[in-house]
Amino acid sequence: MELFFQLMTVPDKQLRAMVYSHVVNDIKALNKGGKNEKVNRKLQAFMHKLLAGTNSDNGGKNKASAINTQDSQAAQAGSATIKDSSSAAARKCIDIACELYRQNIWTDVHTVNMIATATLSSHSPIMVRAIHFFLGIEDRMSDDKEKEEVS
């Protein structure tokens, strides 16, 4: 799973879309016959940890002492790259959790807590996605149910 979230940070849009759909479909297939609680808990714990990592930000600490040396500047650039890739993976993580909830695959308390944790993120795209989930999930789920009944 960690590899898939690392792949979601690459610049290739088609690869990110393919990995996203693979993760959603794989989790959906795991839970098709019945809920696989053991695997679900491990995946949810991993995703929750990834989202919780975006809540705290060390921005601003020790910046004054790091300005003078090239090594520390390179370390800061590497740290920014790690934060950016972590943020991109967390954005996809919240999208996956919301989609699985919408499809009635992960509708338990752990999923809602994971999304609630994302509302406290220091990264605005993650926070906005989580808040948007809470503001409109019932409408989207009822629309899906209506479309399913018409079909």
Image (cartoon, helix red, strand yellow):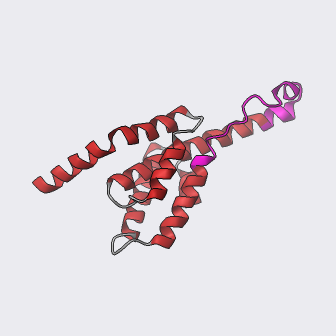
Residue 9 in view: no
Q: Quadrant of the C terminus?
A: bottom left
The residue lying furthest to the left in this view is: 150
Residue 35 in view: yes
Residue 52 horizontal side relative to residue 92, left or right: right
Residue 98 highlighted magenta (yes or no): no
Residue nearer the viewer, 75 or 94: 94
Residue 56's spot in the image, x, y percent? 66, 40
The residue lying furthest to the front in this view is: 109
Residue 142 horizontal side relative to residue 62, left or right: left
Q: Quadrant of residue 79?
A: top right
Residue nearer the viewer, 140 or 138: 138
What residue is drawn where x is 33% and y is 52%? 102
What residue is drawn where x is 55% and y is 47%? 89
Q: Quadrant of the N terminus?
A: bottom right
Residue 44's spot in the image, x, y percent? 52, 59
The magenta region covers 51-75
Q: Quadrant of residue 67?
A: top right
Relative height, residue 141 to residue 29 (above, below): above
The residue lying furthest to the bottom in this view is: 33
What residue is drawn where x is 49% and y is 45%? 116
Residue 71's spot in the image, x, y percent? 86, 35
Residue 63 highlighted magenta (yes or no): yes
How many marks on residues?
Answer: 0
Residue 42's spot in the image, x, y percent? 55, 66
